[in-house]
Image: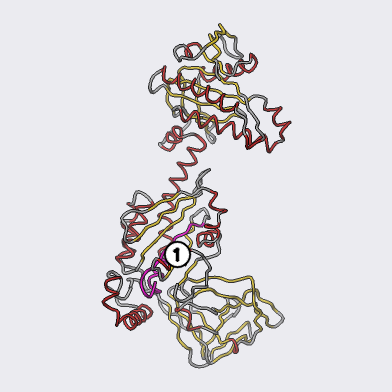
């Protein structure tokens, strides 16, 4: 184990002093974390007094002058000088609506800086209710970069301390092995176990990853140190309006309001989230929710909870925050795959989406298959839009699409596309001609019946449709231009199905099929003889299928 930095050493001394008389009890309760929590990186925060005179200049004018200034050194950040409020020469006006949060120091409250006729918005900050790492600058203010053109200590620039390198089990694992995880659950569990191995008392960890799915808002994975399995939840978009989410750290971080840290014994009132009381009852002493930005700008959320008596140390959180960009990219790989699958299934259907995701992406890629083709057209669309209005009509159109899709999917078919107010569906003959035709006919019967039922949620409106069904050999694949492709079916069966639907609409038959489709399906049929169809060269032997 590498040597502790000054901050980690201070935590170690504190832990030993506080816990000495309870050593046996704590050794039982925290067998893995009783020893000083330490990580093998050098992240720390050190505050030192600056002896002598410190002056902050704005151009050639002094805006602060003090012999009691302090400097905060935080790993890989420029040193920040804090001045006692009474030693600041500029006027500080409270900025009521602006604050930021640091997981190490707490919530920073801002002041507008007035000096020499200027008003600098949010030009200075302080920590009135600081976390332990920030308490050394209590009662002091620092200037935002650019407010002070220079800060001199005894006439010289404030010294910058060198920063070391990050190393240790977590970093090695992230660089060498983390990419082998097959699922986000596996990655989260491995990360949690690796943090524990590196001496960090993580008892619980979760991640919320937003999705691009029409019904699922995202994936929430939860890992517990003492459980073997990771729990995954897939909340719907309804959760975004629920009090549980609106009053949670997830919402706070996801909306770009910054991270959250609450040491439950130090700043219990810093964030008034109901979950904190539940976590406290579970033995949690320290809680962090941090943003995990993805490359597309969406902010996902990683949370960590500790059950160590002293919570997380600065080195603990420093390691996690410094690795957060890499952790975010690892989870983003899973999100991209999941989103691609969801989008393809949503816009193309499950089977077709899988084909595209599997590499069928070039123009001309596809297969010649036998299939039953169903073309379903909503009737009286123009009248419905006129009578109902555009918004109510779109609601009914979506109802039509939803009913049709659910029934087709239930009968081993797939909706290939929505064409205006019509649906094109395919029933591949993988189980034979008869099975494909029966599935198509059963679907048509259920679609007609379900649409006919008045919808109580939309003023009891009943809908009607015209369905055409044909069977034949079709090309199932990509067509289009070089830049814009469409995955569809091409063949006479698709054209005939559409024309049969048009014929049925005129003749007053809700379902019309070719004779070879309906022959052995067990439905009552009415022979229509050889029917002349628009843009079909030869008459087609067809029959009306009696449904409902």
- Residue shown at the point (33%, 73%) measured from the top left: 37
- Residue shown at the point (46%, 26%) measured from the top left: 476
The quadrant in which residue 27 appears is bottom left
Q: Nearer the viewer, residue 341 or 394?
A: 394
Split into 4 quadrants, where in the image is the N terminus? Answer: bottom left
**What is the x, y in percent for residue 396?**
63, 33
The quadrant in which residue 243 appears is bottom right
Q: Is residue 3 above or below residue 339?
A: below
- Answer with left or right where residue 114 lies relative to residue 487: right
Split into 4 quadrants, where in the image is the C terminus? Answer: top right
**Is-magenta flag for residue 471?**
no
- Residue shown at the point (30%, 74%) measured from the top left: 34
Q: How many marks?
A: 1
The residue pinned by badge 1 equals 278
**What is the x, y in percent for residue 279?**
43, 65
Q: Is residue 542 above or below residue 277?
A: above
- Residue shown at the point (50%, 66%) measured from the top left: 259
Q: Is residue 352 above or below residue 188?
A: above
Q: What segment is highlighted magenta in the picture? A: 299-322
Q: Nearer the viewer, residue 233 or 159?
A: 233
């Amino acid at each position: 184990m590498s040597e502790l930095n000054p901050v980690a050493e201070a935590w170690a001394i504190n832990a030993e002093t506080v816990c000495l008389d309870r050593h046996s009890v704590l050794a039982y309760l925290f067998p893995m974390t009783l020893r000083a929590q330490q990580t093998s990186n050098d992240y720390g925060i050190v505050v030192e007094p600056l002896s002598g005179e410190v002056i902050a200049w704005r151009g050639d004018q002094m805006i602060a002058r003090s012999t009691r200034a302090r400097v905060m050194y935080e790993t890989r950040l420029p040193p920040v000088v804090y001045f006692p409020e009474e030693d600041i020469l500029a006027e500080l006006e409270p900025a009521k609506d602006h604050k930021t949060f640091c997981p190490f120091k707490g919530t920073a409250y801002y002041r507008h800086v007035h000096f020499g006729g200027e008003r600098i918005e949010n030009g200075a900050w302080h920590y009135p209710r600081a976390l332990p790492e920030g308490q050394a600058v209590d009662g002091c203010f620092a200037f935002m970069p650019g407010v002070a053109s220079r800060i001199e200590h005894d006439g010289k620039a404030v010294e910058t301390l060198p920063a070391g390198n990050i190393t240790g089990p977590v970093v090695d694992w992230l660089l060498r092995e983390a990419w082998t995880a097959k699922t986000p659950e596996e990655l989260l569990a491995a990360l949690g176990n690796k943090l524990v191995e590196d001496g960090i008392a993580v008892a619980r960890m979760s991640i919320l990853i937003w999705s691009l799915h029409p019904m699922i808002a995202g994936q929430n994975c939860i890992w517990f140190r003492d459980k073997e399995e990771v729990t995954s939840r897939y909340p719907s978009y309804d959760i975004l309006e629920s009090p549980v989410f609106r009053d949670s750290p997830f919402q706070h971080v996801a909306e770009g309001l910054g991270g959250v840290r609450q040491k439950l014994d130090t700043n219990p009132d810093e964030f008034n989230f109901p979950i904190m009381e539940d976590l406290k009852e579970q033995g949690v002493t320290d809680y962090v929710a941090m943003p995990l930005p993805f490359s597309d700008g969406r902010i996902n959320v990683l949370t960590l909870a500790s059950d160590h008596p002293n919570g997380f140390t600065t080195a603990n959180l420093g390691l996690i925050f410094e690795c957060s960009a890499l952790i975010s990219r690892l989870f983003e790989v899973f999100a991209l795959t999941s989103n691609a699958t969801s989008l393809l299934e949503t816009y193309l259907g499950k089977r077709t989406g899988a084909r595209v995701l599997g590499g069928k992406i070039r123009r001309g890629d596809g297969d010649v298959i036998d299939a039953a083709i169903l073309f379903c057209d909503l009737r009286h669309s123009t009248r419905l839009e006129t009578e109902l209005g555009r918004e109510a009509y779109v609601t009914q159109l979506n109802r039509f699409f939803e009913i049709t899709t659910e029934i087709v999917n239930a009968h081993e078919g797939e909706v290939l596309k929505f064409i205006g107010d019509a649906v094109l569906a395919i029933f591949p003959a993988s189980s034979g001609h008869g099975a494909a035709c029966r599935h198509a006919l059963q679907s048509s019967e259920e679609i007609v019946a379900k649409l006919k039922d008045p919808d109580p949620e939309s003023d009891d409106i009943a809908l009607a449709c015209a369905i055409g069904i044909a069977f034949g050999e079709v090309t199932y694949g990509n067509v289009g231009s070089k830049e814009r492709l469409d995955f569809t079916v091409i063949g006479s069966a698709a054209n005939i199905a559409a024309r049969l639907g048009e014929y049925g609409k005129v003749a007053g038959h809700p379902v019309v099929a070719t004779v070879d489709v309906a022959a052995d399906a067990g439905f009552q049929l009415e022979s229509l003889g050889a029917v002349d169809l628009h843009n079909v060269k030869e008459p087609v032997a067809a029959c009306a299928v009696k449904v409902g």
